[in-house]
Amino acid sequence: MVYKRSKNEIKMISKSCQIVADTIDMISEFVVPGALISDLDKKAENFITSQGARPAFKGYMGFPSTLCISIEDAVVHGIPGDIELKEGQIVGIDCGAELNGYYGDHAKTFSVGKISSEKKKLMEITEESLYKGIEKAVPGNFVGDIGYAVQTHAESNGFSVVRELVGHGIGENLHEEPQVPNYGAPRQGYKLHAGMCIAIEPMINLGGKEIYTAKDGWTILTADGKASAHFEHTIAILEDGPKILSKVSYNG
């Protein structure tokens, strides 16, 4: 079922989204060579709980941590163990929180120290692809319009789009209908309406689009071992267009 949220519900979702945006913003200064990603996870959990919220990922289908931290060829769902970040890596950090029964979801990819020009371009194009998709999230358009915008921008710049992992509706559950793929055709899929809240999250690979699941049962890796980038915003579709909810509030 696809939900159309009231103004009050969108406010509630926005509060959760601001917490995850603030969490990732807070974590950003610690994404440096030598940092233990398990420490980043602890900092994030402490911050989320200090805001009166609950980490949405921890315990979700058995996931053990507050953040998904995905390094280099890890696309998403990396488990933050006692691993040190190294100069030249890129790292995707995905965060979710629940406050008063409503969820927020947000992700960003960071550079660790100085990175190669090709990784820098990958990050830039992935983030640009996210905003290209958001621009198409207007009443009367279709889910396929979002995916087509993401896909054409990524592929025209020489990168590939992961097919098996998609964005999603969000609200009283972390994952709701509709699914929001990062590929597709214009005017195809579910029709977008005012009041919908969705998470758009391009996962773009430096090499091929093929992926596999690691032995831990969670981490998704590129099949060719090349780097991947991930950016995500939760948005509300309003009568006058999309509104990004996962923005830093500076209130915490």
Image (cartoon, rainbow, N blue to C red):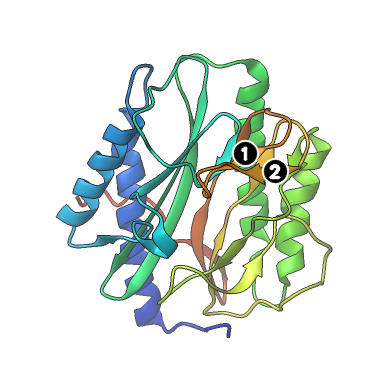
Residue plotted at (55% across, 16% down): 115
For the residue marked with disc 1, what is the amino acid?
Leu
Classify residue 30 by image quadrant: top left
For marks 2 and 1 on the same chain, the one whose residue lies earlier in the sequence: 2
Q: Nearer the viewer, residue 83 or 94?
A: 83
Q: Secondary structure at mark 1?
A: strand
For the point 27% across and 33% down, the residue is 39
The residue singled out by tag 1 in the image is 221
The residue closer to the viewer here, 73 or 28, is: 73
Residue 35 lies in quadrant: top left
How far across and down, in percent of the image, does residue 226 sit?
Answer: 68, 28
Is 147 situated left or right of 29 in this image? right
Q: Residues within 10 Å of mark 2 (few under 14, many from 20)?
A: many
Instruction: Identify the mark at residue 27; answer none if there is no mark.
Output: none
Residue name at image x 19 percent, y 50 percent: 252
Amino acid of disc 2: Ile
Q: Determine whether 56 is above or below 211 in the image.
A: below
Question: Which residue is disc 2 drawn over?
Answer: 211
Q: Quadrant of residue 165?
A: bottom right
The x and y percentages for residue 12 are 32, 73
24 sits left or right of 185 in the view: left
Horizontal and vertical percent position of residue 205? 69, 37
Quadrant where the N terminus sits is bottom right
Q: CA separation, marks 2 and 1?
A: 5 Å
Number of disc labels: 2
Q: Residues within 10 Å of mark 1 (few under 14, many from 20)?
A: many
Q: Are marks 2 and 1 in contact (CB under 8 Å)?
A: yes
Would you place residue 86 above or below residue 251 in this image? above
Per the image, label 2 sits on a secondary structure element best described as strand
Image location of residue 147, percent across then percent down: 73, 58
